[in-house]
Amino acid sequence: MYSPIEPFSPQRAFEIYEFIFMVAFQLVFMSAACSPVFLIGCIVALFIPPKNKPAYHGRVGRFGLLLITFVVTWVLFNSLWSTYIWSHFYYSTDFLYTDFLPYWPITQGYIDIPFGNEKGYLIGITITQLQLLWLLFAIGTWSFTFVLYPLLRRILTASESYKYVFSHE
């Protein structure tokens, strides 16, 4: 059993409260990281001539929904990665639990980045096997995002509150 005063060991399992904290932390961190992407997307949408003002609102609303869906899916898969892959198949000195990026594969160079006297290492697998695990998680993240997005859009379009934002083309 893990106690709060026990030193950190990369081989120990995460407790449920750590998983909840990790998900909450990543939601805040990755939402902040994706905010500039949303702002850039809104600016780009200004240069694509809309038919009317509601069409612009619909475009921005759909883009925002896609980003929100992606961030939530990314956080869930990143949390699963941090719980089941990191410290079981490799150890890195990343203390922000952001090893899994669904658009950038993990490399040996990333694992080897030193922090103080510590350096990362592989645990019983090769970097190719770790990258294949990354590929499975990345495919899952993108697939789940693109399956969930149309479902959420359909639900929100049917809702009277969001009909104005999501129904205009």
Image: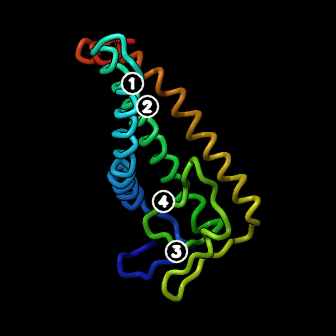
Sequence order check, earlier mark of 4 and 1: 1
The amino acid pointed to by label 2 is Leu
Quarter-wise, where is residue 3 in the image? Answer: bottom left
Quadrant, the C terminus? top left
Instruction: Return the residue at label 2.
Output: 66
2 vs 3, front mark:
2
The amino acid pointed to by label 1 is Arg
13 or 79: nearer the viewer: 79
C-beta proximity under 8 Å, tags 2 and 4: no
For mark 1, give the secondary structure: helix
Residue 109, x across and y down, in percent? 64, 70
- For marks 3 and 4, give the CA distance: 11 Å
Sequence order check, earlier mark of 2 and 3: 2
The amino acid pointed to by label 3 is Thr
Quadrant, the N terminus? bottom left
1 vs 3, front mark:
1
Instruction: Return the residue at label 3.
Output: 93
C-beta proximity under 8 Å, tags 1 and 2: yes
Instruction: Return the residue at label 4.
Output: 98
Residue 77, x across and y down, in percent? 52, 47
Residue 42, x across and y down, in percent? 35, 33
- For marks 1 and 2, give the CA distance: 6 Å
Instruction: Return the residue at label 1.
Output: 62
